Image (cartoon, grey):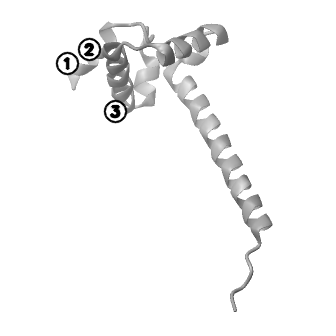
Amino acid sequence: MRKPRDIDSELKALEAKAKSLMERRVRQLGELVIATGADALDAELLTGALLGAVATKDTNAKEGWRKAGAGFFQRGERKAAAGTDRGAANDTAPDRNAASA
């Protein structure tokens, strides 16, 4: 005969794991904001920039941002944080990264 499953304890374990994963995600996003230097921006500006990035349909802009982000991770956090003018609207950043890659 099979052992009955304790659904309540399994559910509690899954909820605890989901909470842990969400806390980890929030912590990593905060670390990313700090590593990019975006913590120097006020909350309204940062929020507006993120909302604009989410709402944009311009695939060229998104691809440029993606390339700039990939370049950030390839260079390493310390070197990228030391740079200036890394805003999402900076159209020269993706070209500069593409030329160096």
Above or below for 64 versus 72: above
Q: Is the residue under label 3 in contact with that under label 1 (CB below 8 Å)?
A: no
**Which of the labelled discs sits on residue 74, or is there none?**
3
**Residue in view at x 25 percent, y 13 percent:** 95
**Circle 2 — which element?**
helix
Q: Which residue is mark 1?
A: 99
Disc 2 residue type (three-letter) = Arg
**Which of the labelled discs sits on residue 96, or is there none?**
2
Mark 3 or mark 2: whose residue is earlier in sequence = 3
Q: CA distance from mark 1 to mark 2?
A: 5 Å
Residue at the extreme front of the image, as rendered? 1
Query: Left or right: where does residue 51 sit relative to residue 1?
Result: left
**Residue in view at x 79 percent, y 65 percent:** 8
**Circle 3 — which element?**
helix
Q: Nearer the viewer, residue 3 or 68?
A: 3
Q: Is the residue under label 2 in contact with that under label 1 (CB below 8 Å)?
A: yes
Q: Quadrant of residue 16?
A: bottom right
**Residue in view at x 73 percent, y 75 percent:** 5
Residue 55 in percent (x, y) is at 49, 15
Disc 1 residue type (three-letter) = Ala
